[in-house]
Image (tube, rainbow, N blue to C red):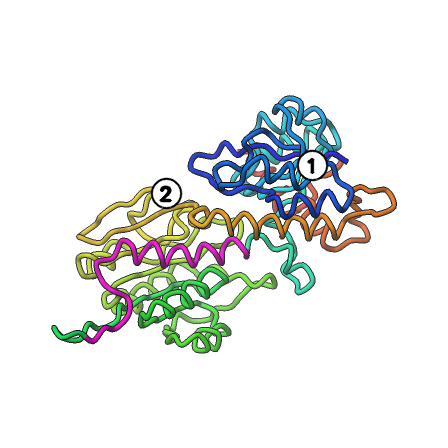
Amino acid sequence: MDFVSLSDGTAGERRVALTPTVTKRLVDLGANVRLEPGYGADADLSDALYEKAGATFASRDELLASADVLVSLNPPEASTLRGLREGTIVISFFDPFRRQELVRLARDGALSTLCLELVPRTSYAQKMDALSSQASLGGYAAVITAADRSGKSFPMMSTPAGTIPPARVFVVGVGVAGLQAIATAKRLGARVDAYDTRPVVAEQVRSLGAKFVELDVGETGQTEQGYAKELTAEQLAEQRRQMAKVVAGADVVITTAQLFGRPAPRIVDAAMVAGMRPGSVIVDMAASTGGNVEGSVPDEEVVMDGVRIVGLSNLPGLVARDASEMYASNLFALIQHAWDEEASALKLDPENDDVVAGCLLTHQGKVRDERVAAVLEEGSSA
């Protein structure tokens, strides 16, 4: 079975879907791994390393023509999906609620797509959860980025010239990214406050040595998948009002709040930014999905009222080697789970496999995920 991966054409992307380590594991499993020349160059992974792991190389056209399985990191380009044969399996992030044209192409081309955003959030599937692994590295990179942009030292320092107090970091949203941001900021010596609409995460925050900020915005909670429930407009307004004092006292604010399949909530408005000290830094991890911070721009840094707002979309890409290794390991776990040893091939059996059923986005000319299908229908009738 030919497993193919192409060089990523996304601007500034250094991560890859397959590393030499995971390539060897796929070859040992019985797969035939084929790549483009120079595939891992941006992640400092040479062709020689891939060849040693058992991969072979060919042109893009040859790879598309022979692919039984296409593995990708970012959503594949439309031209790539058009070049695949019917029945080809595609494993990738798809951003299915916003990249509707790709879902239509996969459906109309009779491609079977395993969408990694839809991997069930269960204990068993945790090793396949690429969304969480990349978010964790994103949280780390967000704090390192903030420390680099800030004129404030993070740890407290006692010097002959006096004592420097620790930086104050405020993390908004305590999911996987937020928890890693808290842990990283604490390791750097900062004083950390954190807030989430889900009170259930308070103990996790405190276990990392941070203070959980309690705001009364009425009834809140989380979905069955563990995501925060969307707040009403009135709750968001009350949240901003109570949060303004905490934001004003922070040297660094990291916002991580995202809603599955919906635009990110606006949490920090212009008035809150104006209330911060000049030289403060905000890293908006949700900039690419609408932004938690008023004024943030995807993939840009802007200064408002002396406050630097960083809207980098690909924070995991700042640590491309480790991000690639983690992503590739998540991919392999999913492939191994669905591998039929007797046939030496992937077996997609959504009727008897809950993991495959959960993330099988398109199959046999249909969109299987009801939520994505509904969004597609709305887009077609608009």
Residue 250 circle label: none
The outermost residue toward the left is 161
Judge from the rendering whether residue 40 lies leftward or rightward of residue 348; answer left or right. Answer: left
State which quadrant residue 39 falls in.
Answer: top right
* Label 1 – label 2 distance at C-alpha: 34 Å
Q: Horizontal and vertical percent for residue 202?
A: 46, 75
The answer to whether residue 46 shows anywhere in this view is yes
Q: Secondary structure at mark 1?
A: strand
The outermost residue toward the right is 342
On the image, numbered disc 1 is attached to which residue?
A: 33
Work out whether mark 1 precedes mark 2 in sequence or the reverse, and give the earlier one. 1
On the image, numbered disc 2 is attached to which residue?
A: 298
Q: Horizontal and vertical percent for residue 324?
A: 54, 47
The answer to whether residue 365 shows anywhere in this view is no
Q: Is residue 41 above or below residue 118?
A: above
Residue 338 among magenta residues: no
Judge from the rendering whether residue 189 lies leftward or rightward of residue 63; answer left or right. Answer: left
What is the tally of numbered marks visible in this picture? 2
Q: Secondary structure at mark 2?
A: loop
> Residue type at mark 1?
Val
Q: Horizontal and vertical percent for residue 97?
A: 55, 43
Residue at image location 22% in from the left, 48% down from the top: 303
Residue at image location 31% in from the left, 61% down from the top: 253
Foreground pick, 34 / 110: 34
> Residue type at mark 2?
Pro
Predominant secondary structure, magenta span? helix
Per the rendered image, the range of residues in magenta is 132-158
Residue 148 among magenta residues: yes
